[in-house]
Image (cartoon, rainbow, N blue to C red):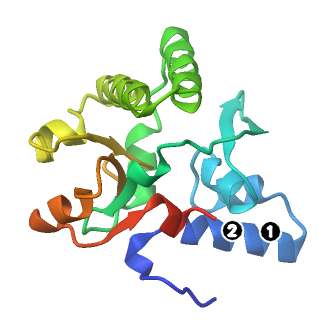
Amino acid sequence: TQLDFDPNWGLGSSSTLICFMAEWAVVNPYALLEQTFGGSGYDIACGNASQPLLYRKISSVPEVQPCNFTPTFRKQLYFVYRNKKQSSQAAIHQLKDKKPSKQQLEQMDALTQAVLNAADVEDFQKQLKAHETLVGNFLGQPPLQETHFADFNGTVKSLGAWGGDFFLAVGTAGTPAYFKSKGYSTCFSYNDLIL
């Protein structure tokens, strides 16, 4: 394969490879993932997607639902590289025996819908913060914004494995300059990365 981006960024390179290999070998990509890297399968669903989606896994069965996500405030959304490659396999191993409660799953579903249906950027940020808090409590880790960007005038949301390769920042036109001043020079606008 040949990537047209820095391999340290991740950006689903492993899952895309699994999807292509499964297509080539005419096998189930989720089964191939399970026998190789492991994980929830969310990244496999994304590797085959042509639009935004909602994903969940119920009793080992992946459930993929296409959705619409075209926020009016997308010019305020940025993806910032954390300057280190996250090991997806290490994160999967750490979570292997952690199972969310039924109540936590219901809260996650409700927050996901609230994020998706946010009426404006303020509501979107409120729901992202609640989502980040819920996941942080489940993992026993403080939110990324609290530990690294407490002075950021906006919202920071972890993506992928907690503290993954990139995080989402909701801010203003000055957001890239803020993160560059903190040593995070790779910052993409939403429109740079989302097709």
Q: Residue at x 39, y 67 (%)?
A: 188
Note whether residue 156 is visible: yes
Determine the residue located farthest toward the right in the rendered image.
Answer: 26
Which quadrant holds the N terminus?
A: bottom right
Crowd class of label 2 (few under 14; some 14 to 19; many from 20; radius 10 Å): many
**Relative depth, front residue between 41 and 73:** 73
Residue 178 as seen in the image, left or right of residue 20: left
Amino acid at dot 1: Ala
Looking at the figure, which quarter contains the C terminus? bottom right
Above or below, 118 against 174 in this view is above
Residue 177: where, in percent of width, then height?
18, 65
CB under 8 Å between callouts 2 and 1? yes
For label 2, the SS is: helix
Q: Amino acid at mark 2?
A: Ile
- Label 2 sits on residue: 18
Disc 1 designates what residue? 22
Report the residue that reaches farthest toward the top. Answer: 103
Mark carried by residue 87: none
172 left or right of 76 in image: left
Residue sitting nearer the eye, 119 or 9:
119
Query: In percent of the image, x 18 and y 41: which residue is there?
Result: 153
From this view, report whether residue 117 is shown above or below residue 178. Answer: above
Q: Residue at x 36, y 31 (%)?
A: 125
On the image, the x and y values in percent for residue 149 come to: 14, 46
